Image (cartoon, grey):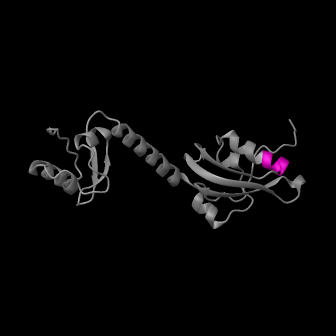
Amino acid sequence: METGEPLDYRMIEVNPAFEKQSPQGNAEGRWMRELYPQHEERWFEIYRDVALTGEPIRFQERSKELETLWFDVYAFRIGPPQQKHVGVIFTNITERKHSEQALRDSVERVQVLAQAPVAIVVFRGPEFVIELANPTYQALVQGRELVGRRFADVVPEIGADVWAACHHVMDTGEAVVREEFYRT
């Protein structure tokens, strides 16, 4: 059926940045459906709309067919409208998207820990500077200022066995789970 609407797109010209950002080498002059027959229709629809309307668009989209990569894309019409040519500037943002997801997951875990009914304190560095203490732990130390201070300064009554466990974690990276009982 002849509709006059674009159904595919061809990479007329690519630059070295394209080769670095794209999983597909040797794409110049080739049709997208030839390279990736299962490429998501959404991409074709976006570029078709730009070609037909002349309205540029900026979007971020993931393509499962293109090795599940994420792209930040700016698409715009170039040349006379009857040619229906679209220029595309894109950046592969897959690594950034994965980092953002890892950060969201990490924040979610910290939020869950922060509300746990057990006392949790998180340190950093060889000085054991407190980065996080959940409300249960804060109640144990009865209002002492915690975050940003050295653990030894906040809770000087901690025994040598606790310090040995803390140093073991810092030295080996292995987790240590301990139960401590304090008089309040």
Residue 10 location in percent, x, y? 74, 53
Front residue of 86 and 184: 184
The answer to which quarter of the image holds residue 152 is: bottom left
Above or below, 140 relative to 85: above
Residue 172 location in percent, x, y? 20, 54
**Residue at coordinates 63% horizontally, 53% vertically from top-left?**
72
- How many tags in the picture? 0
Residue 48 location in percent, x, y? 78, 46
Looking at this view, name the residue that lies furthest to the left: 160
Front residue of 136 and 170: 136
Residue bounds of the magenta highlight: 49-54
The overriding secondary structure of the stretch rendered in magenta is helix
Is 50 contained in the magenta span? yes
Residue 5 location in percent, x, y? 84, 43
Above or below, 129 relative to 2: below
**Residue at coordinates 37% horizontally, 43% vertically from top-left?**
110
Tell me the quarter of the image containing the N terminus. top right
